[in-house]
Image (tube, helix red, strand yellow):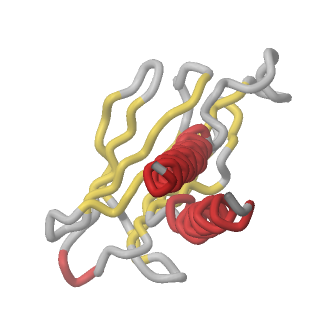
Amino acid sequence: MKATQVLVPVASGIALGALLLPGTALADTTVSPSTTPVGGTVVLTATNCNPNSGDAIFHVTGPDRDQNVRSTTAAASGGLSAELFTAGFTLGTYTVAATCGDGTPDGSATFTVTPIGGAQAGGRDGTGGGGTLAVGATLLVTSLGGAVILARRRRHAAQAATL
């Protein structure tokens, strides 16, 4: 069996994965800045919401929060935005999921609340792109599995032809 017969499907799978991964990393909802000290302010923006459809609702969940924040202004870059003051928040990572005024979801984003005066000790919390890595790993394993199946089929076909 030629190496190209195996490498071409694997390379195709990797190329497809490379094309799809940037799309999974794009978010329609943004939080700026992505890290803020307790008592800081973050700006929540639903970039694809049409201001004429009504206010966007930002659902904030995290270690000590499960609340909705209504958009207050049309964002300069398009969409709708709101400011969130983090006084009283527990340290940790929070998720913001936006829903446009017409009921369509606009994606989600995360932000981290840190102690005043510095970053939280302890390193990474495991939320730094794990979903994107999982998608990439799944695509890679799938392409490798397809190459193995293809190689076995061709080997069995070659053996059957010689019998």
Residue at the far top in the pictured view: 122
Residue 64, visible in the rendered structure: yes
Whether residue 115 sits left or right of residue 22 in the image: it is right
Q: Residue at x 38, y 57 (%)?
A: 107
Whether residue 63 sits left or right of residue 127 in the image: it is left
Q: As displayed, is residue 27 above or below residue 163? A: below
Q: Quadrant of residue 104?
A: bottom left
Q: Residue at x 68, y 40 (%)?
A: 36
Q: Quadrant of residue 87?
A: top right
Residue at the far left in the pictured view: 102
Q: Residue at x 47, y 47 (%)?
A: 156
Q: As displayed, is residue 107 above or below residue 121? A: below
**Position in image of residue 83 (x %, y %):** 49, 55
**Position in image of residue 18 (x %, y %):** 63, 65
Whether residue 130 sits left or right of residue 56 in the image: it is right
Residue 83, visible in the rendered structure: no
Q: As displayed, is residue 84 above or below residue 71? A: above
Q: Residue at x 58, y 64 (%)?
A: 9
Q: Nearer the viewer, residue 147 or 66?
A: 147
Residue at the far front in the pictured view: 163
Q: As displayed, is residue 106 above or below residue 51? A: above
**Position in image of residue 52 (x %, y %):** 22, 84
Q: Nearer the viewer, residue 25 or 77?
A: 25
